[in-house]
Amino acid sequence: MVDSRVGAYADALFAVAAAEGNLAAVEDELFQFAQALGSNDDLLATLTDEAVPAVRRQQVVEDLLDGKASATTSALVSMVVAAGRAADLPAIVTAVVERGTASRNKAVATVRSAIDLSTDQRSRLEAAIHTSTGKEVEVKVVIDPSVLGGVITEIGDDIIDGSIRRRLNQLRESCR
């Protein structure tokens, strides 16, 4: 169950992005920011530190997103951080992305890959997932160097591990 505050923030961010007319782009930018936040302990500590004035925390967000995200995304992240909810941002963003994909009658497929995927690779992966699962999905890529190669796909509770690491482990097991 999603915390009611997380749900309320997700509803607000979703409504603003939809009203601005760039929901899909804002979803992607929020997703990327949430991934960066989750993988950078120093950034998370700074944005959640109540001793750091809210204006300074907002400036950190604006500096990080300057030229890399839309004004809408920057304003939304800044608002969440100023409200003291930076620690909840990954959960809020997950809820926003779920609302967005559900509004398009799709599911979220989180794909871990050592490198970013091109638009063509994403489209082919979406088609392959649809063929194997019957689900229409939108791919959200998380860059994870530990994957080595291939991809690990999560759709809800389902995990499809097509990584080289898994294949190497299978090879090691079969040679024992």
Image (cartoon, rainbow, N blue to C red):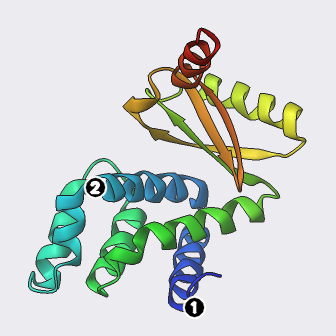
16 or 171: nearer the eye? 171
The earlier-in-sequence mark between 1 and 2 is 1
Q: Is residue 88 above or below residue 120?
A: below
- Which element carries disc 2, helix, strand or loop? helix
Q: Is residue 133 above or below residue 117?
A: below
Residue beneath label 1, please?
Answer: 4
Which label lies toward us, 1 or 2? Answer: 1
47 or 72: nearer the eye? 47
Name the amino acid type tagged 2. Leu
For the point 45% across and 59% down, the residue is 30
Q: Position of residue 141 (x, y in %)?
A: 53, 40
- Which element carries disc 1, helix, strand or loop? helix
Name the amino acid type tagged 1. Ser
Q: Which mark is residue 62?
A: none
Q: Is residue 146 left or right of residue 11?
A: left
For the point 76% across and 65% down, the residue is 103
Question: Distance from label 1 to label 2 (Cα)?
Answer: 27 Å
Image quadrant holding the N terminus, namely bottom right
The answer to which image quadrant residue 90 occupies is bottom left
